Amino acid sequence: MAATVAAPSRGTNNSLIVGIVLAVVTFWLFAQTMLNVAPAIRADLQISESLSNIAVSITALFSGIFIVVAGGLADRFGCVKLTYVGLALSALGSLLIALSPAGTAFFLMTGRIIQGLSAACIMPATLALLRDSFDGKERQRAVSFWSIGSWGGSGFCALFGGLVASSLGWRWIFWMSIAVAAVSAFLLKDTPENKVTTADRPRFDWFGFLAFIIAMVALNIVIGQGDALGWLNPTVIGLALVFVIAAVVFLRVEAGRADGFIDLTLFKNRTYAGATLSNFLLNGAAGTLLVALALVQQGAGLSSFQAGLLTLGYLVAILGTIRVGEKLLQQLGARRPMLMGCAITAAGILLTTFTFLRARQYMIVAFVGFTLFGVGLGFYATPSTDAALSNVPGDKAGAASGIYKMASSLGAALGVAISAALFTALSGLESQSGPLSDLFLGRTDNIDIRFAAAIALLFNVLMVVVAIIAIALTVPRDDPGVGR
């Protein structure tokens, strides 16, 4: 049973909300800037593109792996304590990245892993803090601000990162992140602690957890380093086998446990399974940002700030349509706005694949594409969350929520990793003198990059199409929606 605490004053409430939002943006705004500033970091640190690609995806990977564990730790030791741990880890990870010396990726990689652990702590703990500190309309208001911090941060990260990297240098992004984490910790200092007693809590499934970590890390390394090392390299083949064995062991062991690391019985509910799978795939489409922004920097000579401006419509659209998605859910149920959001997202990403256009034409089309991308995600977000969490038993709501959020992070990690791997591998093809040159307008010296980007972006379209199929097959037409 949760401890009972006195409700904080209104002024404390506002400080709590601001502190929580600042904690959330340490990941969604600052850590996610890597999607745009990776080329600048790669050039400054003199590291390979494959290592840079892993650095981009590894934060979301570790966030996804540990978020379920962190949610349990928040219940066991307290949400405020775990939020402080997350903020400390965020500051440490940002410090290592900001101090990264040229010629090595060790500081960068370590810092990015720590940032992932930070996000795993902060996300479930701050949501639980909102649940315990507010009621009724005040809770809805607080959750809206939390969503603005996460969705707004993810929408603003490319533009913000480009602006700072172009004017002050990319390291300043992470110095700023440390300052924001410190301010967040200060604002949360008077927040009363709530925690759950652990008398009847089952033992943690360490075996399943370790098998899951081994499988996910092995897969991420294979995707990120396969092209650099060679797909038939013994190390790559060995890691691929490690992934398969660990994944099979995990599934076989977890299927027979009632208290497993991941409650696989939740996926017997088709609506929950479809919403979670589509959430995984939609977040995987984050690879669109990485590829399209890298393309205009490498192929058209734009700065990171100029590239980030292409996502301005994405930011405005996603913030402007989240509430629209909520209204559509209330009027139509979850299925139709989820399908509508995915269709609009797919159309937006498809526009970014038009790399055969001249640079100026492409930038206009990509701007429209990113705006549609944001509209689609705004329509999809709330109906998908409701479809997932309103269709599971009340006593499993916490586990279901953790798995759903884990799908978000793992989808982003693997989607970005695969998109980056495709872009990197295909960029090396010698196509300038081949028949492809007749398909591209304007310059011919960057056809390899433009072709590689088109294929990698089409992969993101494919993921959204699969999400549409999953929703169509699993989410019922008469979905009850909110409040019914």
Image: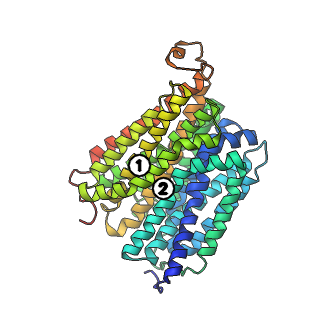
- Give the tally of numbered discs: 2
Amino acid bearing label 2 = Trp
Is residue 347 shown to the viewer in this render?
Answer: yes
Tell me the SS state at disc 1. Answer: helix
Along the viewing direction, whichever of 363 and 175 lies nearer the viewer: 363
Contact between marks 2 and 1 (CB within 8 A): the answer is yes
Q: Position of residue 472 (x, y in %)?
A: 28, 44
Which residue is more in the foreground, 218 or 316? Answer: 316
Is residue 250 something one can see in this rendering?
A: no
> Looking at the picture, how far across and down is residue 198, in whole percent?
49, 77
Tell me how the rendering is colored: rainbow
**Residue 93: quadrant of the picture:** bottom right
Q: Residue at x 40, y 47 (%)?
A: 375
CA gap between label 2 and label 1 equals 9 Å
Mark found first going from the N terminus, 2 or 1:
2
Helix, strand or loop at disc 2? helix
Can you say whether 417 is above or below 475 in the image?
Answer: above
Q: Which residue is mark 1?
A: 377
Q: Does residue 41 appear to the left or right of 103 in the view shown?
A: left
**Residue drawn at (49%, 36%) of the image:** 366
Left or right of 476, for residue 51: right
Q: Which quadrant is home to the N terminus?
A: bottom left
Relative to 266, residue 426 above or below: above
Q: Which mark is residue 151?
A: 2
Q: Is 309 on the left-hand or right-hand side of 171?
A: left
Residue 74: x percent and y percent? 52, 71
